[in-house]
Amino acid sequence: LSSKQFTAIVEKSTNARCLTRILIYELDRILSAVALLHFHARLNRRKVPTTNPISLPISFVLNLGLRPGVGTKGRQIRLRTNHSISSVRNIDATFYHYHVNLTYEDDQPVDQKAIRRKAMDTLQKAYAYDLANMNFAYDGEKSMFTVGALQNGRDVFFVVVENASSSKAATSMTQGANGSPEGSDLKIMKPPMQPKTFKVELSFVGRVPMSAICKVLRGQGSDNCQEVLHVRCLLVRQPFFHNNPIDFYELGGGIMGCQGYPSSFQPTQSGLSLDVDVCTTMLVQPGPAKRALKNLRVRTTHTNFEFRIAGLSKKSCYEQMFQLEQRNGNGSVEVTVYDYYLKRWDIKLKESANFSCLNVGKPKRPTYIPIELCHLVSLQRYTKAVTVLQRSSLIQHPSSPKSILPDLQHSCYNYDDMLKKCGILIDSKFAQVDARILQTPKLKARGDRDLIVENGRWNFNDNSVIQAIELKKWAVVNFSAACDDARDLARRIIDCGNAKGMQIDREDAIIEETHERRRESAQTRVDAMFQQISSKFPHQWPSFLLCILPEKKNCDIYGPWKRKCLAEHGIVTQCLVPPKNIKDQYLTNVLLKINAKLGGLNSLLQTEITSAIPLVSRVPTIIFGMAVAHGSPGSNVPSVAAVASSLEWPRVSQYRASVCTQIPEQEIFSSLFKSEGNADRGIIRELIEDFRSHVKHLPEQIIIFRVGVNEGQFTQVLNIELAHVIEACKSIKDTWSPKFTVIVAQKNHHTRLFQPKGSRDDDNVANVPAGTVVDKGICHPGNYDFYMCAHGGITGTRRPTRYHVLHDEIGFTPDDLQELVHSLSYVHQRSTSAISVVAPVYYAQLAAAQARQFVKFDDMSDTGSSASDGAAPVSPEPELLRLHEKVRSSMFFC
């Protein structure tokens, strides 16, 4: 905007919000143009005088990598998908985008998405006339779309919603004086969920013509790309989960699985496609509350009120006392919970009289209810880790075309009002696509022996690892009371390792934890164990420690132990929980991890031995895998970002990793390049310098695999993360300009592939073979993407990985790139099977997950979640401990 234009807008504008929106829009355009200039300057190898423009907010949509063609290698095969092709018959339709400002009566924002949706559903019913009986699609946040315009460009509505109180309000309404079980007896008890009044302000944002969606379907660009993506996700509004008995099955331990049916529209080469999948969520089985489960909702049997569990009382119903206010106003008396319910409600507690009560109040104003008077409310998600038996029960219900939807004709999609107005008609059958099965990569063991690979699996039964380690000074530490023969376990590991070509000497010590230590805290137990280790090895620490843990899942010793070994002392360690019946295959799997962690290699691709990987073996090439691990939603726990990088060339099987922390729930990397004075303290420089020390050359090509980002973040990967990597390269050597290829790997999608056994209409299907690739039919009509299913598995549990090629300066052909991706799924050193995603990405995920154990994030989470009203305070970014220099370049995450 020129100064005159800006002055004119200010003088004419009577709406500050409108003015702000215009200024933000123009500023965004300027920043986007600046970012685009820098990006294209990078492509053209031109220097742009600037400081560091990379941290600017970007909303401009670049043209991502365009498809150079499709692959031709591999055996042709015809597959069934869970896509149903749709036709668009009304290209003249227009979507109207409205901004939704939803607040309480006092103008406080509404944070809970479920309450926001309830308010908007009520708005649609209560103000049907004002909305011209028009249905709308709402995203649960700030956007709403209609087919056709509303009567006014801006409107304000007030809606009253039943059962819309938050959990805090629900408990506070029933607080009795001084901890009485259900409020003061002087007052009539009120339902915990009171009606709430909401203010809904709708303001017009813009139009999204159906022709823009049709342009995207033809692979053409559109000025409304972001809005098109938004509309596409909102068109289908049928519920994911139905309260239908046939969709539930028990998993044991009071937990059950519930199948749901997520669906969304996707632009594909075949047109607009409805993607219908089946997924499973864990629910708490409704019924009597046999134990307190924090934050779960219960309904009382004697009042039919609903509460949220805050905790347990310290004493039983017989012993727990509270102050009960007298009806006549003569003060209060102290009574037990048992006596209160006997005298006030004529209820004689039986089953739970000797158990603690449920506390549904606040810490300083508890409200106690006996367990036997509470039933768990149905359809509550179970968010904790499931047991091995529960997971085993879960995979017995695989998803197939039969379980996704018996017949799309039985669905209500074609009767949806918005779809009918758009002229979208959905085919009643699932589509079939052409696919190819790539040739299995050849793997080598010691002695140039071939590993026999069948459907993505192999073993080392008669083979030795290709590069074995020598283990001379090591020890066994035992935290488990259940493992009473650690010496025999060590002997069997030595025998099995020697059979696989490793040279493992007898252990130097077996250190048992004393019985009295097992009741102490995890950190105390670890510190005490290291005191014993120090006494056994007074002059030099052992090079390896085999640690026997007391439990497999959620063991509180794991984090402190890993931190002590890797960060403080530089000792490679392997933790395990040996089963009762230890088999040779179990020992082999443990030894594969140990060998990789100590610097060995278990197998190699034949193409990397013979330097025959297309383009990669031609010039020095480094491969990055990038991932970010987040805490649970709302926990305010710092996210952990990790980058795994290859260490050798032309080999691509050995990696190391670097990790850092960043702002909670932030997905885009913030530490790839960090300028401190004249030095770069970012992750990338450290990894490239390590590569140069091994290869003696700087890489001429850099391949980046990124996981965890969605389509709306692709431009940020290019404009922010790739730009950071380029800055890091320039900080190493200003004249160094390597070529880049950036690929995003997506597992969080709903496309499934099935191999039909019979006719098109037959639901009898089989697994797709390992190495299946699809790059036409259901892929994006313009952008460069493909689906790869490199691994084997049981029916319905496999989900292909979708690879998006955002940028390719190296110039891979579709066949060369697909074979590279396929091969990198076979270099995972701790596995004897192909994995579902390329190894660099998987290593980055493992490194981030393990690094999370180094910091006591649980304590931070409790602090952050204890904030009162409003958003939780942002926790400071902790400095993640760097690994000891002895293990920094190792595959500690393996």
Image: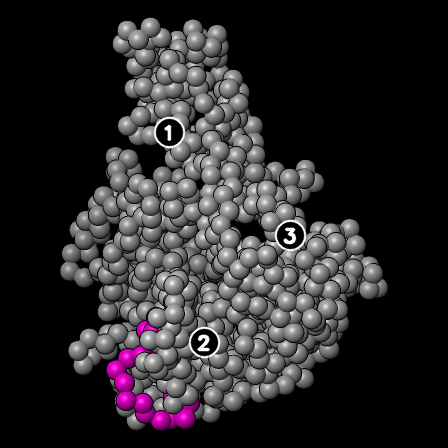
How crowded is the residue under tag 1: few (<14 C-alpha within 10 Å), some, or many (20+)? some
Q: Is residue 115 above or below residue 650?
A: above
User: Which numbered disc, 1 or 2, marks the residue that appears first in the sequence?
Assistant: 2
Locate residue 196 relative to residue 858 in the image: left or right: right
Check disc 1 and report its element: helix, strand or loop.
helix
* Distance in Å between CA atoms under marks 3 and 2: 35 Å
Q: Residue at x 51, y 47 (%)?
A: 157
Instruction: Tell me the residue that label 1 is attached to.
Output: 172
Q: Which residue is mark 2?
A: 60
The boundaries of the magenta stretch are 42-57
Q: Is residue 51 in the magenta section?
A: yes
The residue labelled by disc 3 is 132
| The quadrant where residue 468 appears | bottom left
Quarter the C terminus occupies: bottom left
Picture coordinates of residue 19, whole percent (x, y): 38, 67
x 64%, y 61%: residue = 147
Q: Is the stretch drawn in magenta largely helix, strand or loop?
A: loop
Q: How is the image coloured?
A: one colour
The answer to whether the residues at label 3 and label 2 have Cβ atoms under 8 Å apart is no
Question: Which corner quadrant of the image does residue 264 belong to?
Answer: bottom right
Q: Is residue 755 visible?
A: no
Observer-nearest residue: 77 or 858?
Answer: 858
Of the numbered discs 3 and 2, the one sitting upstream in the chain is: 2
